[in-house]
Amino acid sequence: MSKRDTMRTPLARVRHLGSARTGTEHFWRQRVTSVAAIPLSIAGIVIVMSLLGRNHAAAVQILGSPLVAIVMLLFIVTSAYHMWLGMQVIIEDYVHDEQWKLTALMANTFFSFTVGLASFYAILKLSFGV
Amino acid sequence: MADAKEARLQATRPLSPHLSIYRPMLTMMMSIVHRITGAALYFGMLLLAWWLVAAALGPNAYGRVQWFMGTLIGRVILLGFTWALIHHLLGGIRHLIWDTGRGFGPSEREWLTLAGLVGSIGLTALLWIVGYLMTGGVR
């Protein structure tokens, strides 16, 4: 054994290459959001179905009531995060041109945040009125 | 010159087998469908956002959403959304089971995958029947 007790070369160390110790983070967040999405999407289906055929006033009342609003907010945040992660993987799998890939990844972020925050804001507006 | 040599090398070197090499299997097809339904739900979330923002905007905007969801195209999109959501949900549960290392036996994996497919179609039909019963039948 030399003085070096690591497989990494000095050059790699200088360049900060190698394990960032975050390799499974994306995978793990996908799993966490998917587990959360199981009860939340079932609750979401029940909430949406309970509003079938009802008019605007009834929809506002139900969507703005605290427990329904909290469940919807959790559902929205979980879904937006989950779809952001999922689409990132799809883009990285199929878009190989570096510029298009970065553009698509950026568009994915913008889309997920816009859809998520618009839905989030709408629930808050229905909850607090004004 | 170098390009021609490279092209010849690419053509003759052994390639790793890809989708077109394998006989289509249920687990493989459902894996692909899981990704497709995920991508469909990604854009389907626009519908949810539209619906919620319309509810926040007022009765007129909400009425327009309700009108669109009542049209044939709207209903077809909603039916697709329902099935995609349930299929992705059941597929996700299957993948979580597989993540624990369980359910990989030759018959288990086929059974789990088939259950996801049959379950998603059955549950979608059930939800739509309940939905139509709640709103007083097909109009």
Image (cartoon, rainbow, N blue to C red):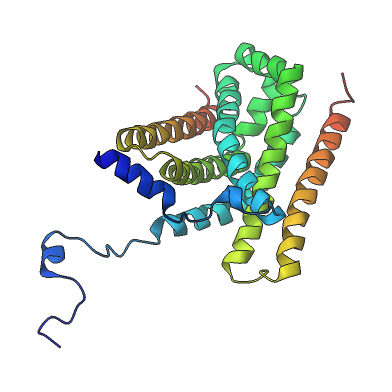
B80 vs A102, left or right, is right
Q: Position of residue A78 (x, y in %)?
A: 52, 46
> Quadrant location of residue B103?
bottom right
Q: Residue at x 66, y 69 (%)?
A: B104
B56 vs A57, left or right, is left
Q: Position of residue B62 (x, y in %)?
A: 64, 17
Q: Nearer the viewer, residue B63 or B120?
A: B120
Q: Position of residue B112 (x, y in %)?
A: 73, 61
> Quadrant location of residue A92?
top left
Q: Residue at x 37, y 45 (%)?
A: B8
Q: Residue at x 72, y 69 (%)?
A: B106
- Quadrant of the snapshot with the N terminus of chain A: bottom left
Q: Nearer the viewer, residue A71 or A29?
A: A29
Q: Is residue B3 above or below residue A10?
A: above
Image mark count: 0
Q: Nearer the viewer, residue A51 or A106?
A: A106
Q: Residue at x 59, y 16 (%)?
A: B58
